[in-house]
């Protein structure tokens, strides 16, 4: 924006210089014709030279006014751009996300430049990981809080142990399952997942 403003000022200055040259030329021509005077120069020629001189003066005034206005516009645009930058920097300072504790980012719910409508990121304490699983309703009678559990999956490096932390009181779905929350004994084994 500064470069464009500088070019606009340069172009307006060039028009002033050109108008000044044209005005100087018209004035010198008028003065020369006036100096010759007498019967050699007709009144119509003198009127034409006076008209050219006055017209070039008006053109110079217009070019100078345009240059002044261009400089004012550039100064205003620069000031406005500085204010917008200041506002953007303040907004950026307000968008810094600080974690309330030493947690790990496990999910990002936005992209740069977007205005989020909910949680921007999900944080987790990976030293206390839990697994939510489903157990058939018929097997719930055999589960107790604090009971040892073993979790197996093809995506795990091997069986992982934990304890039953919470048992949902609701039976859901056609398969008649209950959600059970397990607390892992050693969460470091699945931290990479």
Image: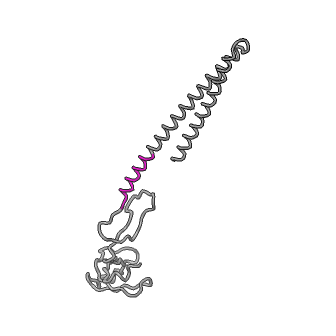
- What x and y, as percent, mark residue 165? 28, 79
Q: Residue visible at 58% across and 39% down?
A: 11
Q: Residue visible at 66% across and 17% down?
A: 35
- What x and y, as percent, mark residue 103? 33, 71
Compare residues 131 and 74 and report the one nearer the observer: 74
- Residue reaching furthest to the right: 40
Image quadrant where residue 169 sits: bottom left
**Residue 84 inside the magenta-drawn segment:** yes
**Residue 32 inside the magenta-drawn segment:** no
Q: Is residue 58 left or right of residue 187?
A: right
Q: Residue visible at 43% across and 47% down?
A: 82
- Quadrant of the drawing holding the C terminus: bottom left
Which secondary structure is most common in the magenta stretch? helix
Compare residues 26 and 190 and report the one nearer the observer: 26
- Residue reaching furthest to the bottom: 158
> Which residues are the magenta region?
81-96
Q: Is residue 115 left or right of residue 62?
A: left
- What x and y, as percent, mark residue 50? 64, 19
Count of numbered circles on the image: 0
- What x and y, as percent, mark residue 52? 65, 23
């Amino acid at each position: 924006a500064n470069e464009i403003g500088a070019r606009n000022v340069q172009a307006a200055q060039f028009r002033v210089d050109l108008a000044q040259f044209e005005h100087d030329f018209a004035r010198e021509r008028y003065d020369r014709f006036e100096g010759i005077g007498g019967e050699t120069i007709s009144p119509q020629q003198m009127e034409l030279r006076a008209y050219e001189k006055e017209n070039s003066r008006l053109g110079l005034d217009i070019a100078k006014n345009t240059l002044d206005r261009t400089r004012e516009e550039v100064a205003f645009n620069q000031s406005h751009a500085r204010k917008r930058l200041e506002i953007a920097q303040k907004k950026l300072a307000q968008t810094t996300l600080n974690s309330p504790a030493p947690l790990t980012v496990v999910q990002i719910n936005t992209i740069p430049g977007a205005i989020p409508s909910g949680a921007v990121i999900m944080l987790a304490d990976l030293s206390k990981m839990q697994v939510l699983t489903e157990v058939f309703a018929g097997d719930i009678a055999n589960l107790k809080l604090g009971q040892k559990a073993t979790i197996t999956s093809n995506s795990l490096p091997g069986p992982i142990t934990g304890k039953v932390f919470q048992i949902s009181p609701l039976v859901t779905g056609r398969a008649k399952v209950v959600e059970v929350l397990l607390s892992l004994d050693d969460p470091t084994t699945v931290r990479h997942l």
